[in-house]
Image: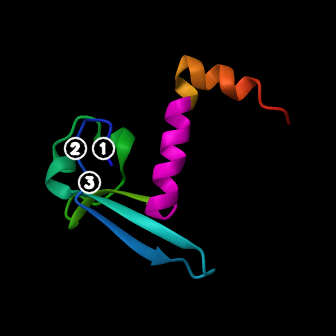
Amino acid sequence: MICPRGAVSISWSDQVKSSGTPISRVQFAATDCRCCPLRPACTRASHKGRYGRSLTLLPRDQQEVLDQRRQQQLTRNGNSAMTSVPG
């Protein structure tokens, strides 16, 4: 995963919410976030914490498929394909 400024996440961990829903937790290095000019719009993580930005997403395999489909929708062919799908 890449943040708005271009830093790459340092970890993905599979977890389960108390409701039983599987999730992935993605974390970025605190050193990448501390001095970042985009920090106020990107994260509320503590300046003293171990991690910077942290995201909670679908399990990694599902999130990657979702991201691919979203990217396809941004293409011209993807948009025309999506608009012709009934429903």
Q: Element under label 3?
A: loop
- Name the foreground residue: 39 vs 23: 23
| Residue at the image position 20 percent from the left and 67 percent from the top | 50
Residue type at tag 3: Ser
> Disc 3 and disc 2: Cα gap in Å?
7 Å
- Identify the main secondary structure in magenta: helix
Above or below, comparing residue 17 to residue 81 in the picture: below
- Tell me where residue 37 sits by quadrant: top left
- Where residue 52 is drawn, which disc sits there? none
**Residue 46 position in % (x across, y down):** 28, 60
Amino acid type at mark 2:
Ala
Residue bearing the label numbered 1: 2
Say whether marks 1 and 3 touch (CB < 8 Å): yes
Residue 62 in the magenta stretch? The answer is: yes
Cα–Cα span, label 1 and label 3:
6 Å
Q: Secondary structure at mark 1?
A: loop
Whether the residues at callouts 3 and 2 have beta carbons within 8 Å, the answer is yes
Question: In the image, is residue 81 above or below residue 49?
Answer: above
What is the CA distance from the residue labelled 1 to the residue labelled 2? 6 Å
The number of numbered badges drawn on the structure is 3
10 Å crowding of disc 3: few (<14), some (14-19), many (20+): some
Mark 1 touching mark 2, by CB under 8 A? yes
**Residue at the spot of label 3:** 9
Q: Residue at x 35, y 60 (%)?
A: 26
Q: Which residues are magenta?
A: 58-72
What residue did someone put label 2 on?
7
Specify which label sits upstream in the sequence, 1 or 2: 1
Identify the residue at horizontal 77%, vertical 31% (top origin).
85
Q: Is residue 20 left or right of residue 37?
A: right
Q: Is residue 57 visible?
A: no
